[in-house]
């Protein structure tokens, strides 16, 4: 094979030649990058866990966006419904596809293999369009996860500006809304508090959609007054302690949610005049303890599916894979040690045989200094199948 000192062979520019050492270094770098990005195990789908909070992915190869969200003019297939899948399915069932990361979404069941998301066949699977991790599940293709919620994120679009997100060219910072889980450009939000002053952001669209959010009165809140489409002014809540919170009578230091459910929410009356004015909310740790749970507010929380505001949320993350720090060579050796002796000896013999044949095949190239092309390598392995 070519070395760093070899001259370019006829028909091959120096820039197109990759040396054996360079190739191995590149593969090692790719292995390290993969270990960082895909650090979890991917042998189990989350489907059987039901509707859970989990990192999600969407496949733009197996789904077709409507015209509004098509990023190229070559889309020939009719639009399909949006769909999402778990971490494991994004790797096992959609390898080589155009997969985008959606980050964590709330109360979502993996769509892979259901009627919304039938994976396109991959090499070695024939014409199978089933989920590779749920092969034994019957009638999966007729199943629909009716409680899943979808938005423009599933086509790769984010923010109120509704633009496609490309991490490689995105210049600004994006901030996730705690309620709807959409992400917003900092420039589209406007003026922001200092980073240490808040942990959660609630967008103006959610505040307008769910009036109960408007009635949160907490010393943990910073209100962003929206002028001409962007936050122009920041104002801290006037609440200085829990006695001033809505639903409190002023003679107790209990948080609002501890008070009698029959009490009327004063904050609801106080903010009626401001109901039409848009604003964002920036919340510091502990703000959920100040959510009012009077009968009227609690009714809205339950009706609008906002019960997650009142409890700690668990995110189902992929199990950490300790082997991801190993090279492919080290991983193969470790697997070899787990085999019984007969299988291990057979595997080692097969590896030695293949290695010897490959060395003999490449020897003439080394002697002549000829460049080994991809076609040469494919020809070698095609001959092994005969």
Image: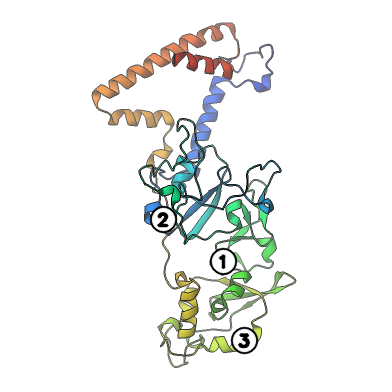
Q: Nearer the viewer, residue 165 or 335?
A: 165
Label located before the other in sequence (3 or 1): 1
Front disc: 3 or 1: 3
Q: Which residue is mark 3?
A: 272
Q: How is the image coloured?
A: rainbow
Marks 2 and 1, the one that precedes in the sequence = 1
Quadrant of the drawing holding the N terminus: top right
- Give the left or right position of residue 239, taking residue 140 as reference: right
Disc 1: CA contacts within 10 A as few (<14), some (14-19) or many (>=20) = few
Say the numbered circle drawn on residue 196.
Answer: 1
Q: CA distance from mark 3 to mark 1?
A: 31 Å
Q: Position of residue 33 (x, y in %)?
A: 52, 39
Q: Residue furthest left?
A: 341
Label 2–label 1 contact, CB within 8 A: no
Query: Is residue 252 visible in this depiction of the protein?
Result: yes
Reading the image, the residue beneath label 2 is 316
33 left or right of 313 in image: right
Residue lying furthest right: 228
Q: Nearer the viewer, mark 2 or mark 1?
A: 2
Query: The C terminus appears in which quarter of the rendering?
Result: top left
- Report the residue at 40% width, 83% height from top: 258
Q: Secondary structure at mark 3?
A: helix
As measured in the structure, the alpha-carbon distance from the residue carrying label 3 to the one carrying label 2 is: 39 Å
- Quadrant of the image occupied by residue 88: top left
On the rendered structure, is 349 left or right of 165?
left
| Circle 3 Cα neighbour tier, 10 Å, few/some/many (<14 / 14–19 / ≥20) | few
């Amino acid at each position: 094979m070519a070395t760093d000192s070899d001259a370019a062979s006829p028909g091959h520019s120096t820039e197109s030649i990759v040396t054996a050492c360079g190739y191995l270094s590149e593969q090692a770098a790719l292995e390290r990058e993969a270990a960082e990005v895909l650090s979890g195990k991917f042998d189990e789908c989350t489907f059987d866990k039901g509707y859970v909070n989990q990192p999600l992915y969407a496949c733009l190869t197996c789904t077709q966006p409507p015209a509004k969200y098509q990023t190229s003019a070559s889309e020939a297939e009719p639009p399909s419904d949006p769909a999402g899948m778990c971490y494991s399915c994004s790797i096992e069932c959609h390898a080589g596809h155009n997969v985008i990361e959606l980050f964590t979404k709330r109360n979502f069941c993996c769509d892979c293999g259901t009627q919304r998301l039938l994976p396109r066949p991959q090499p070695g699977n024939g014409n199978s369009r089933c989920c590779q991790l749920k092969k034994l599940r019957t009638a999966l293709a007729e199943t629909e996860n009716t409680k899943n919620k979808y938005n423009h994120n599933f086509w790769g679009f984010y923010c109120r500006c509704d633009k496609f997100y490309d991490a490689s060219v995105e210049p600004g910072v994006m901030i996730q809304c705690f309620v709807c889980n959409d992400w917003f450009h900092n420039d589209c939000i406007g003026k922001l508090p200092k980073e240490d002053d808040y942990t959660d952001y609630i967008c103006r669209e959610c505040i307008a959609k769910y009036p109960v959010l408007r009635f949160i009165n907490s010393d943990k809140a910073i209100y962003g007054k929206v002028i001409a489409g962007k936050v122009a002014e920041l104002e801290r809540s006037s609440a200085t302690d829990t006695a001033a919170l809505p639903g409190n009578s002023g003679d107790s230091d209990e948080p609002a949610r501890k008070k009698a459910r029959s009490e009327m929410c004063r904050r609801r009356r106080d903010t009626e005049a401001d109901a039409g004015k848009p604003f964002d909310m920036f919340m510091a740790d502990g703000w959920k303890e100040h959510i009012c749970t009077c009968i009227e507010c609690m009714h809205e929380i339950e009706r609008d599916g906002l019960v997650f505001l009142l409890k700690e949320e668990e995110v189902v993350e992929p199990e950490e894979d300790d082997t991801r720090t190993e090279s492919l060579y080290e991983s193969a050796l470790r697997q070899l040690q787990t085999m019984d002796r007969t299988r291990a000896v057979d595997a080692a013999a097969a590896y030695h045989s293949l290695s010897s044949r490959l060395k003999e095949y490449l020897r003439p190239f080394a002697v002549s200094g000829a460049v080994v092309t991809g076609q040469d390598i494919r020809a070698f392995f095609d001959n092994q199948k005969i």
